[in-house]
């Protein structure tokens, strides 16, 4: 077998020493650069510096070291082309069979607070991407590795067959081009976001997004549409795509969309909570002392809509909660964990999709909360982008605008109602009381109609609205919506305020004996 030549030049040294040792044991010649070469030499491995191999010294602080015909000729030469082979022999170029390269840590550098433009520029790799592109283009002859996770599989093939398969080399090539695309996108995003004064805009002049496919889906929103699920390159801990499906049928497009709505809502509560979602709207939300109690309360809000819904808990689903949920038809059930008893109960419900998702670590950033920092929506040949609605209301932000002051219990109910309203499609009206939703009106063109629908739903569920708290995701344009709430039995209302008729609405609240607080923030959700 012809001796293999491997060029190893990595910024992240994870696993490289073990990989190099195994290659040496297989008889491979090792080429390397800089810190990688030093690491291998200190471990007693015979390694040839690239400068010695090319006969040309590194220069310009290492900026020029691998940009040489003896490197790129060795990577680009085709073994099945006589002219290439002859050129190699004439110019003393050695074929490079294996290339292991990971790039300067540009993404990690620019993510650091206080990163300067000079720091960013110095961490733009030139030689690494050039070698990776050369090797990836010539995948029929070269195995290119850009991730330490690839080392073990390649070594297994080399030990078994003395070479890597076409399938493996092509897969490595695709992964390499993907990595280069990610790297270049990060550089473009950073540089095109810089302003003249050195600050950065949230919206760069060119937006390059990088997503990795998780799976193809059976179809989209409707059966005539195709679909797939992608995740961020680096998903936030506690976000939906980090979950693990424990059992059940494959998730559909609509399952995933609804599951995300339920999971985002249930994460908003600190106490044990349950959220039931149907068609992307919460139809029942409750907090209680246990998961089982929270589910019982949430289900009471709208048993009809809960049929075939998506259910999320922010606490472990134990046997008691599982027994209650298993009585109903549920599409997806999500929780941070499931007890052994709960898992046993759901074995009899094989089609129920169980999703286990760890709660986010918590912290000030959307990332810490398992949330997106930004949202986007496709429009005709374009993309709307915005920061995500990650505003969380503090009690001290509330402003009481009526003569009647809300009680402590009413404030608790109002804060709960406001949290739920953030996840209900606009126009949104949410009646609440005692830590549970009582009636939800969603997605109507008129806020008045949302108020009426929420009241009707409560009546159908045999839930009294007397003394209830109500949240409206945006201001009341007229007093008529408030009158509907008062007629239904509401005792207090939370709303953003800001209407040109605020005085009229506040006067109506005073007239009807309703306490009203305003937030100064709305939660449109289209």
Image (tube, grey):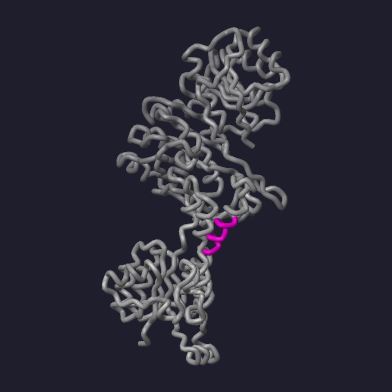
**Image position, residue 236 (x, y; %):** 46, 46
Q: Between 68 and 212, which is closer to the camera in this rendering? A: 68
On the rendered structure, is 193 left or right of 138?
Answer: right
In the rendered picture of this protein, how many numbered marks are placed on residues?
Answer: 0
Name the outermost residue toward the left.
Answer: 44
**Image position, residue 297 (x, y; %):** 45, 25
**Image position, residue 17 (x, y; %):** 32, 68
Q: Between 492 and 250, which is closer to the camera in this rendering? A: 492
Rendered view: 114 above or below 498? below
Q: Does the stretch in magenta take in 231?
A: no
Give the residue at x 51% y 81%: 69
Span of residues in magenta: 180-188
Rendered view: 102 above or below 371? below
Quadrant of res 429: top right
Quadrant of res 146: bottom left
Residue 321, visible in the rendered structure: yes
On the rendered structure, is 9 left or right of 137?
Answer: left
On the rendered structure, is 322 left or right of 442?
Answer: left
């Amino acid at each position: 077998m012809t001796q293999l030549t491997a060029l190893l030049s990595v910024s992240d040294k994870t696993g490289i020493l073990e990989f190099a040792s195994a290659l040496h044991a297989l008889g491979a010649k090792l080429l390397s650069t800089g810190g990688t070469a030093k690491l291998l030499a200190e471990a007693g491995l015979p390694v040839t510096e690239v400068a010695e191999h090319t006969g040309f010294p590194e220069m310009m602080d290492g900026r020029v070291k691998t940009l040489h015909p003896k490197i790129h000729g060795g990577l680009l030469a085709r073994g099945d082309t006589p002219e290439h082979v002859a050129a190699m022999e004439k110019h003393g170029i050695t074929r490079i069979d294996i290339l292991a390269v990971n790039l300067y840590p540009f993404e990690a550098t620019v993510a650091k607070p206080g990163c300067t433009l000079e720091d960013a520029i110095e961490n733009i790799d030139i030689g690494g991407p050039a070698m990776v592109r050369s090797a990836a283009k010539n995948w029929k002859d070269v195995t290119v590795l850009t991730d330490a996770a690839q080392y073990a599989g390649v070594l297994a093939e080399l030990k078994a067959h003395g070479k890597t398969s076409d399938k493996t080399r092509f897969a490595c090539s695709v992964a390499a081009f993907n990595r280069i695309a990610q790297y270049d996108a990060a550089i473009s995003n950073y540089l095109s976001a810089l302003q003249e004064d050195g600050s950065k805009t949230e919206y760069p002049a060119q937006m390059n997004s990088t997503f990795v496919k998780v799976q193809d889906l059976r179809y989209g929103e409707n059966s005539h549409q195709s679909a797939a699920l992608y995740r961020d390159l680096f998903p936030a801990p506690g976000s939906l795509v980090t979950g693990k499906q424990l059992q059940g049928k494959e998730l559909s497009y609509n399952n995933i969309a609804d599951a995300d709505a339920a999971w985002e809502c249930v994460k908003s509560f600190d106490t044990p909570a349950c959220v039931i979602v149907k068609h992307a709207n919460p139809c029942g939300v409750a907090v209680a002392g246990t998961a089982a109690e929270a589910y019982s309360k949430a289900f009471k809000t709208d048993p009809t809509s809960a049929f075939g819904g998506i259910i999320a808990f922010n606490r472990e689903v134990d046997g008691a909660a599982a027994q209650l949920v298993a009585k109903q038809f549920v599409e997806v059930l999500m929780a941070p964990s499931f007890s052994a008893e709960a898992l046993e109960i759901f074995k009899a419900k094989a089609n129920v999709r169980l999703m286990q998702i760890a709660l986010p670590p918590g912290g000030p950033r959307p990332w810490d909360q398992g949330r997106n920092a930004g949202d986007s929506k496709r429009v005709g040949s374009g993309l709307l982008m915005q920061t995500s609605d990650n505003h969380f209301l503090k009690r001290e932000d509330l402003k009481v605008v009526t003569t009647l002051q809300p009680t402590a219990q009413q404030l608790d109910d109002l804060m709960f109602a406001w949290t739920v309203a953030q996840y209900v499609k606009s126009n949104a009206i949410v009646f609440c009381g005692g830590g549970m939703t009582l009636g939800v009106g969603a997605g109507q063109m008129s806020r008045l109609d949302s108020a009426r629908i929420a009241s009707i739903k409560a009546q159908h569920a045999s839930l009294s609205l007397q003394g209830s708290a109500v949240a409206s995701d945006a201001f009341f344009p007229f007093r008529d919506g408030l009158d509907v709430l008062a007629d239904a039995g509401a005792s207090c209302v939370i709303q953003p305020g800001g209407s040109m008729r605020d005085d009229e609405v506040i006067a109506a609240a005073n007239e009807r004996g309703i306490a009203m607080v305003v937030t100064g923030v709305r939660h449109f959700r289209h």
